[in-house]
Image: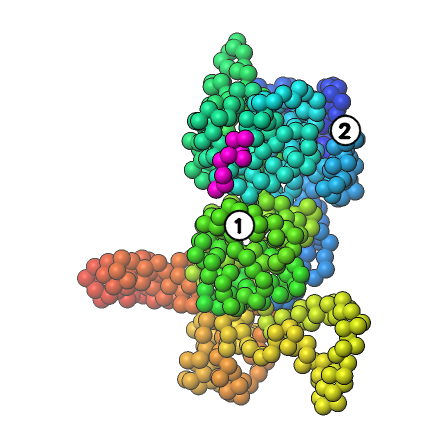
Amino acid sequence: MPTIEMSQQIPEIAMVNGDDVSLNGEIRKKKKSKKEKKIKSDDAEIESPSKEESPSEEKPKKKRKKGSDEEGEDEIKKKKVKKEKNGEVQQNGIVKEKPSSSKQGEVDEETQEKIGAFSNFGIRPKTIEKLHAKGVKYLFPIQAQTFKPIDDGFDVIAQARTGTGKTLSFVLPLVEKWQQFPQKSGRQPIILALAPTRELAKQISEYFEAIGPHLSTTCIYGGTSYWPQESAIRRGLDVVVGTPGRILDYIRKNTLDLSKLKHVVLDEVDRMLDMGFAESVEEILGAAYKTGQPGDGEEAPNNPQTLLFSATVPPWVYQTAVKYMRKDLKKVDLVGRDRMKTATTVQHLAINCSYFDRPQVISDVIKVYGGLDGRCMVFCETKRDANELAMSSDVKQETQVMHGDIPQTQREVTLKGFREGKFQCLVTTDVAARGLDIPEVDLVIQCNPPRDVDSYIHRSGRTGRAGRNGVCVCFYKRQEERDLQKVEYKAGIKFKRVSAPQPSDIIKSSVKDVTDLLGAVQPEMVAMFKSAAEAIIAEKGAVAALAAALAHITGSTAMKTRSLLTAEEGKTTFLLETQSQLMDIGDVFKTLGRYIDRDSRNAIKGIRLCKDQTAAVFDVSDDHKDYLLSLWQDTSEAQLTIATELPELLVPTQSGSFDDRRGGGGYGGGRGGGYRRGGGGGGWGNRSGGGGRGRGGGGGYGGRGRGGWSGSYKKF
C-alpha cells in the first residue's frame, strides 16, 4: 500500500494519491521536494490500497534514500526537542508546571490554528456558530485531514490517538454535506453510526444534534423502552446512531429500513468487533450493502460511503473492514510508525501497591494529583471490584460507580453528573473507556495493568484531551511487573515508577487546596466565627491553632508512615548507597552485616537493587527503624538513610526475581538457573536445576544435582 505524506505547512494544499489537491477541488501534478517530505509539522499518512504505483510516487522514494543522512540528523534533532518539552515529575510523583508535550510530527497551536481554520474548508457560517458554541475554534489534525476525503465521497479508515477529536471528524463533513434536502414524513435514514457502547452512541448522537439540528437524529440502544425509538423511526429520520444489538432487532422486525443509506460510520470499530458484535455488524451492513467487490471491468456496487474511526486499528480489523469498502479507500493515519500510541499530553506513572492497601492509596493519589476539585476516573477490571472500591470507606472523595449492571437510565444520570462536576470520582469498568469526551478529567487511575494493551491506551485517553495535560496512574503488584513492561512495549510509553503519596505530599497538596478555598468564604460568615477563633488563639496561640485547624480540615489528624516500595503502612523505606557494585541481595546483606544483628536482619523486607546497582532500597517496620539507625555507622564506602523518594529500580528481565537470581522452575518444584545460584531448568519432582555461574551442576531425575562451574553432573 503506497504511502503519501500529507503536508500541513501549506494550509491550502493536501496530498491525495500523489497529486496536489487544493481545498476547492483543483488538482495538479507536483513533484515533491525533500523539504515537503521531511516537514516537521505532521506525521499523518494517507494511504490507498491500490497495488499500482505511478512514476511520480516512485521518484520521491529514491530521493528519500539519497538524503537519508540528512534525514537521520533531523530525526535526532526531533528527539532532542521531544526530550526538552516533555514534562517532569518531581519526587513522589508531584507534577511540576510544564509546557505541553510535543511528539515528532506534531505542530504548535498557532500553526495548527492556521491549518485548521474553518475558511480552509468552506464550512458554512451557521455551522461555524455552532462549533464556536461547543468551544471549537479550528479543526484538529484528524478533523482537518479527513474532511476532504469524506466530503469527496471516499471510504475512509482513520486512526488517531485518543482525545484528538475523532467524533467531530465524521460528524462535521456529513452535516455539511446534507444541509438542504427534502424532509418527508416517514423517510428512511441516510446516515447510520454504530458504536460499541451506549454511552459512546449517545455522545455521537449529541454531536449530530448540536452541529446539525436540521437533521432528525435518534439514538437507539438497549436497556430502554422500545416505543419512543419506534415512534421516532415511524416519523422519519435522517441520522440513526446506536449499538448493534438494538439496531439489529429493528431490522429483523422490518421496523428500520436501511435501503436509502448514503453513509455508514463505525466508531471504535476494533472494540465493536472484539466485543462479539462482528456477526451483528455483518448482518446490519448486509441490509444496506450489495455484497462483493467489483472484478475487472465491472462497476462498483452502489454501497454507502463507509467511514471507520478508531485509536487502534489492528491488521485483523483492517482485513475485516475492507470487505465492505471500495478499493479506492483512503487511510488517514496520525499514529503511523510512532511507537507511542497514547496521547502525548499524558504522563504515565506506576505505583506498586497490594490490593489490601489500594483503596486508601487511591484516595491519596486523587488528593495529590487531582486536587480538591479535579475530576478522576478509576478503572476496575470487574464490576465487583468497581462496587467494592466505590463503597470503600477509605475513599474519601464523593464517588459514583458505573458498569454494565447499572440500569441505563441511572448510567446516563451518573455520566451527566460527572460531566457537570457534581461529584469528583467515577469508578467504572471499560464501559467508559471508549470515545467518551469529558475534557475536564485531570486524572485516570487503572487498578491493574490490563490484559489487553489497547484497553490501557483507551483508558488513559480519558485524560489529556483536547490539548490539556493529564496524568494516568497504573497500580500493580510485584508479580505484575512484566505486565507493566508489556504495556510499555506495545503502547510505546515509559512508566515512571513512583511511590504512593507520602504524608508530606498529601499535606502539601491539601493545604494548597484549603488555602484557595478560604478566599471563597463570605465576610459575614467569617464574622460569626471571630469570637470562637479569638478564644482558641488565646489558649493555643495563633499559629498552633490555625495549623491544627488546617490539619483537621485536610483530614491529616494522624501521621502514618508508608513504604515507598509497596505503599504498606507502618513501614519505612531505607536507601543504602555504596561505592561498589551490588550484584544481588547477598551483597546488600554483606554490606549491612558489619553493623546489624540478626533481629535487624530479619526485620529487613523487600530489598530492591537500584538501576545503577550501587544502591539498594528496602523496608523496615517502624518498631525496628530507630534500632537499625542506632546500630548503623556511615563510612566512606556505604551510607544508610531514610529514603524520601523512590529511586529508579532495576527491573526484572528474566524468570524469577532479582532477590535470589533463580531461574525458572521445573515441574513439581524444581529450581532453575540464574546468575549465581543454579543453572538450567529444574528437574521433575523437586529436583534442583543446574548449570549456573556460581553453583552449577545439572539436577537429574534421580537426585539433587549440585556441581561446579561447567555444569557437569555430580552427585547423581
The image quarter containing residue 673 is bottom left
CA distance for labels 1 and 2: 38 Å
Q: Is residue 564 left or right of residue 601?
A: right
What range of the chain is rendered magenta? Answer: 223-231
State the image coordinates of residue 575 (x, y, percent, origin top left). Answer: 55, 74
The residue shown at (47%, 29%) is 250
- In the image, is residue 416 above or below residue 711? above
Which residue is label 2 attached to?
A: 124
State the image coordinates of residue 538 (x, y, percent, origin top left). Answer: 75, 89
Which residue is label 1 attached to?
A: 410
Name the residue at the bottom extreme.
539
Say which of 400 and 440 sits in front: 400
The residue shown at (32%, 59%) is 665
Residue 487 visible in image: no
Q: Is residue 668 left or right of residue 501?
A: left
The image quarter containing residue 689 is bottom left
Q: Quadrant of the N terminus?
A: top right
